[in-house]
Amino acid sequence: MPYENLKKLHDAEIICIDAATTPARLKVVVKTTENITLELLFEQCSHYRVTDFTPHNIISRAIIFDGNSVSEQAIRETMKWLTSLSDAASFLTNSKLDELTASLLNGNIKLIYLEPSQGAELAILCKDFQISHLSST
C-alpha cells in the first residue's frame, strides 16, 4: 500500500466524492498542488463520515490510524466521531468500540482520516484502500 503517497495529499483539493453501497466503497478524487489527479479508493467500508463538504475542500493531512503513530485513545475518539452525527452521539456500544479498536490494532481494518484545512472532513473505516494516479496536466 502506498503510504508514502499520503504526503502528496497535503493541500490537495477534493474534487469528487462517490459512494457505493454494493460493494461498500468510497471513492475520493483529489487534485494535488502539482495538478496531479489522484483517486483514493476505500474498499469494504463498514463506516464513513463526510462533513462540511463545500465548493472548496482542501486536505491539510491524511492520517492512518494504526496504533503506531496514533494513540489508542485518538483511535477511539475518531471512531466515536465517525459513527456519530451532528445531532446524535455515536451508536457504537463500548464492547463494539473495543472490538473495532482491537481489529484495527491487529491490522484487520484501517481507519483513515482526512483532516481539512478548509471544507470537507472525512473519516473512513475500511478493509483496504489504494491510491491511483489518474492524470497530470
Image (cartoon, rainbow, N blue to C red):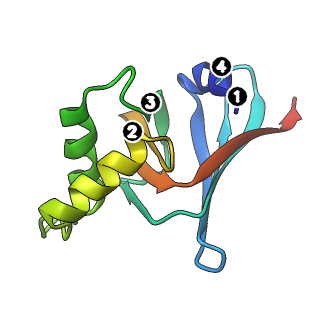
Q: Secondary structure at mark 1?
A: loop
Mark 3, residue position: 63
Q: Amino acid at mark 4?
A: Glu
Relative to residue 36, is residue 87 drawn left or right? left
Helix, strand or loop at disc 2?
helix
For the residue pair 6 and 92, the one nearer the viewer reads as: 92
- Disc 4, disc 3: CB below 8 Å? no
Alpha carbon distance from label 2 to label 1? 19 Å
For the residues labelled 1 and 4, say whether their Cβ atoms are less than 8 Å apart: yes
Q: Nearer the viewer, mark 2 or mark 1?
A: 2
In depth, the one of 56 and 41 nearer the eye is 41
Q: Observer-nearest residue: 9 or 68?
A: 68
Taking the image as drawn, is residue 122 in sight? Answer: no
Residue 10 vs 19, above or below: the answer is above
State the mark number for residue 105: 2
- What residue would you read off at disc 4? 4
Which amino acid does the dot numbered 1 rest on? Pro
Quick check: 104 left or right of 20? left
Residue ID at (39%, 34%): 115
Q: Quadrant of the C terminus?
A: top right
The residue sitting at 36% across, 29% down in the picture is: 67
